[in-house]
Image (cartoon, rainbow, N blue to C red):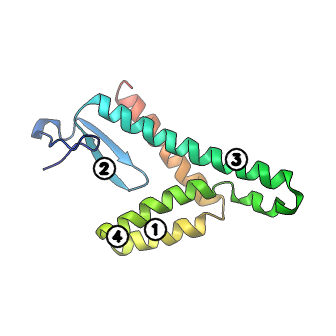
């Protein structure tokens, strides 16, 4: 039986595919019992993404102002990638298996590059834009 991601309520058969989103971090489909719960989940995800990027921007500004920390400015995506890694690590311990193990290390390696974080950020933004088109959020 499928449960609502927000409230844990078991969904009836006709509601199982009515309000659906894809969680880019957990790499899985999420079901919701109502549009309000989907909207709340989306808002939480966007807030987390923006907070992580804002922390990265603050780190970069501090690194650029302090002349001896300038090499650390490349870690703009570090808080964002820690957010991604925490989800991958949680999936690994909850039975995600070898795929989650590989994902976790790709995220760690990707935290010092710009290509992987930009790709993940693009995936998240694309999913939230798709949700806005599909559901009147």
In which quadrant of the rendered view does residue 111 lie?
bottom right
Structural distance between the alpha carbons of marks 4 and 3: 31 Å
Residue lying at 41% horizontally and 37% vertically, measured from the top left: 42
In which quadrant of the rendered view does residue 7 lie?
top left
According to the picture, the residue beneath numbered tag 4 turns out to be: 93
Q: Which mark is residue 103?
A: 1
Residue lying at 64% horizontally and 48% vertically, measured from the top left: 55
Earlier residue among tags 3 and 1: 3
Earlier residue among tags 4 and 1: 4
Q: Nearer the viewer, mark 3 or mark 1?
A: 3
In which quadrant of the rendered view does residue 93 lie?
bottom left
Looking at the figure, which quarter contains the C terminus?
A: top left
According to the picture, the residue beneath numbered tag 3 turns out to be: 57
Structural distance between the alpha carbons of marks 2 and 1: 17 Å
According to the picture, the residue beneath numbered tag 2 turns out to be: 29
Look at the numbered discs 2 and 1 and tell me whether their residues touch, using CB distance below 8 Å.
no
Position above or below: 7 against 99: above
Earlier residue among tags 3 and 2: 2
In the image, 39: left or right of 109? left
């Amino acid at each position: 039986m499928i449960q609502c991601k927000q409230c844990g309520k078991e969904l009836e058969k006709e509601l199982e595919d009515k309000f659906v989103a894809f969680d880019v971090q957990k790499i899985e489909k999420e079901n919701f019992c109502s549009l309000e719960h989907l909207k709340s989940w989306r808002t939480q995800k966007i807030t987390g993404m923006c907070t992580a990027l804002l922390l990265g921007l603050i780190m970069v500004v501090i690194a650029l102002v302090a002349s001896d920390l300038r090499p650390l400015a490349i870690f703009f995506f570090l808080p964002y990638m820690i957010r991604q890694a925490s989800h991958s690590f949680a999936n690994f311990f909850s039975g995600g298996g070898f795929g989650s193990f590989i994902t976790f290390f790709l995220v760690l390696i990707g935290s010092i590059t710009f290509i992987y974080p930009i790709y993940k950020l693009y995936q998240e933004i694309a999913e939230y834009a798709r949700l806005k088109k599909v559901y009147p959020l």
